[in-house]
Image (cartoon, rainbow, N blue to C red):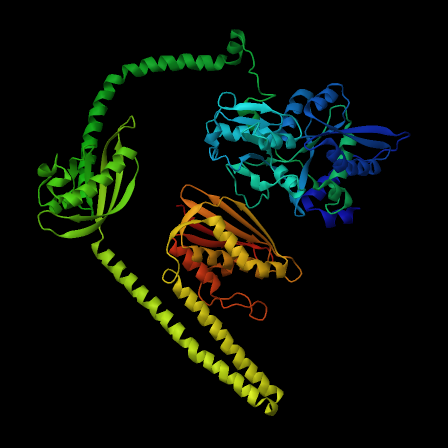
Amino acid sequence: MLIFCLKKIDMVRFIWILCLYWSAFPPVFSQIEAVTLGILSVHPKVEEEQRWQPLAAYLTRSLPGKKVQILVLGYDEMEAKLHHHELDFVLTNPGHYIQLRQSNALSGVLATLEESVDNKPMDALGGVIFTLKQRDDINQLSDLKAKRVAFTNKSSLGGYQAQAYQLMQAGIDMADDVQLRQIGMPHEAVITQVLEQKADVGFVRAGVLEILAKTGKLDLAQLKIINPQNLSSFPYLLSTQLYPQWPFVAMPQVNEELARLVTAQLLLIDHEGLITQAGGYHGFTIPADYSSVEELLRTLRLPPFDTAPLFTLQDIVQRYQYQMVILGLASAMIIFLGLLLLLKNRQLLLAKNQAKEGESKLATILDNLGAYVYIKDTHYRYLFANQLTCHFFGVSMPEIIGQVDRAFFDSETAEQINSNDRRVIENGERLEAIESNTLEKTGETRSYLSIKLPLRDSRGRIYGLCGISTDITERKKMEEELQRSNADLEQFAYAISHDMRQPLRMVASYLSLIERALTTQFDDETRQFFAFATEGAKRMDQMILSLLEFSRVGRKTDPMTTVASRAVLDEALAFLAPEITLQKAVVKVFGEWPALIASPDELSRLFQNLIGNAIKYHAEDKTPEVTIVATTTPAWWRVEVRDQGIGIDPEQFDRLFKVFSRLQARSRFEGTGVGLALCRKIVEHHGGRIGVESAGEDQGSCFWIEIPCA
């Protein structure tokens, strides 16, 4: 048995089990004793009983003289059973455990449940906030105000408490700001309320939606997740922070030896055995830390922390007598400090003088700064200008104070500057813009990078703006020259690649003709030589085609226009349909697919390359599985293409997006090494970013892109 333990569990768990066995050897019983395990119902009771009955049978076999029976109970039923001491052990959610601990004087958690996702342990849980996909008025937490919210029970951590805590952090009061509708268990009832539009929003435990979708009871495309949390370590849809999984608890009447023996048997459960497979979980592990759950309940003022203790004046005196003495001394000290206030006036005058010195030093710094620094009031009149600005205007500081831009610039330039100033004053936001200024006195036009920010008083009111402008005229000229040079190089690469194909095809054709004409005279080695030459010509042609396609990005493709991103994805999947069918690949699509400003054919090619690679680079004995997830922030639209393929060594990330850079041998995977470089160029042409994440070889990978929202 001990050797088996060493093979199946880690050293920490093994030591825990060993201690339990040393302290509690199973005694010999003369008769069968019933042991009752109460389990909180999440799904319909019939399903829960089928899930947990193998555990009861396993414990019965493992505990001599004991017969373990399970009772699947709702919250009210469990409270009634506990009140009459009819339960020996309980498996419930963490929030309910904290409540039981307060009312039943429990000693602690025996073990923590580990759920199983893709045969991997998951020791955390959370909550999901969802609504119907077509509800355009509900997109973020603040939109839940005045909405009807369906949930199971306030004792459910994943079904209510986690979401309520998240909303409180966002400034939403569950009692006053939303309309609560308690439905009761199971979680499916909450989903039904939302689907039938009897509720606007639903709270369920993370994982419930995926389980129902997997069994065909729910179409996830009907729903929209509010406040999605993209955690790579958590496989389910999530709207809240994570909390520890369900605790397994012994009630006070259970003797210590039985509790230890049950704990040992729970930790010995085979993670890949029939018990866990039938129950759909990974097993049990050593107790988790439930302090985060207690903090949540205290913050929300939920049971058992929903009532404040009563204090009398006598209690306050007895409990805080030392503090009251300190308070009296502090009061005396305050009076004494008041007498010192007059002395502080002299220090205040000294501080004012120091402030003036600081202002003088600041003015010196600004005057020697290689940028134009100025301050304007809310009517865009100059209040300050450093020496460089005065020199630029050709006037002194007193001549600038009180003037507006029309006194120094032509009307078009002045209006451009004032338009940017208005945005800063009216919106109260920092602004960075390139301004082209034509000086009225000289007529010279130059370009400046201007950073402008609002100035606020102690009460937060805007009283002006500060601007810092840097001359970038020469830099812009260099950038324009560089753009022209790059355009010439791209045109040159396109022309060279196009012209090279004709002689290359001629070489391949004549090699084929020579081979056909002299095939009877060739020996095996000569035929192999001709095969190498022909194959090399074909590969060269493929590389030239890839180079042509690379050079066309931004020049020979569709212009930027408003496109439906999901329609472009569907088009790419249609192109890939033969390969998907051939490889028997599974492609799943989730998330938000908004309208974008993009080149349709470039975006389609981008999706084809990323999804095609995810299908292509997989082990021969595995079916490709590709998950495409799109999320939206105010500034960016992000798409992740995840696979379970051969993975990538993180040390090779820098090579991935370079032209003709290959990580895999051509004998294993065909390709030119241009695909990902093309993806990078397309994304950059759209002003976006591209990257990759992978834990290493055989660990799968995730390629992501971010494109500015329309």
Tell me where residue 345 appears, x and y as whole percent. Answer: 22, 21
Q: Residue at x 18, y 52 (%)?
A: 446
Q: Is residue 527 above or below residue 279?
A: below
Q: Position of residue 1 (x, y in %)?
A: 80, 46
Q: Which x, y percent locates residue 364?
A: 17, 42
Quadrant of residue 516 in the image?
A: bottom right
- Could you tell whether 248 is left or right of 650 in the image? right
Task: Tell me where residue 688 appears, x and y as whole percent.
Answer: 40, 52
Q: What residue do we see at 55% from left, 86% from top? A: 515
- Name the residue at the right extreme: 30
> Position of 495 compared to 524: left or right?
left
Q: Nearer the viewer, residue 343 or 576?
A: 576
Question: Above or below — where is 650 with respect to 509?
Answer: above
Left or right: where 153 falls relative to 350: right
Residue drawn at x 53%, y 7% is 314
In the depicted view, which residue is nearer to us: 680 or 199?
A: 199
Which residue occupies the extreme bottom position in the image? 521
Q: Is residue 345 above or below residue 659?
A: above
User: Does the image show residue 560?
Assistant: yes
Between 123 and 191, the residue placed more toward the observer is: 191
Q: Is residue 312 left or right of residue 90?
A: left
- How many marks the image carries: the answer is 0
**Residue at the image position 71 percent from the left and 24 percent from the top:** 78
Residue 468 position by quadrant:
top left
- Asked if one can make out residue 361 in the rendered structure from this viewpoint, the answer is no
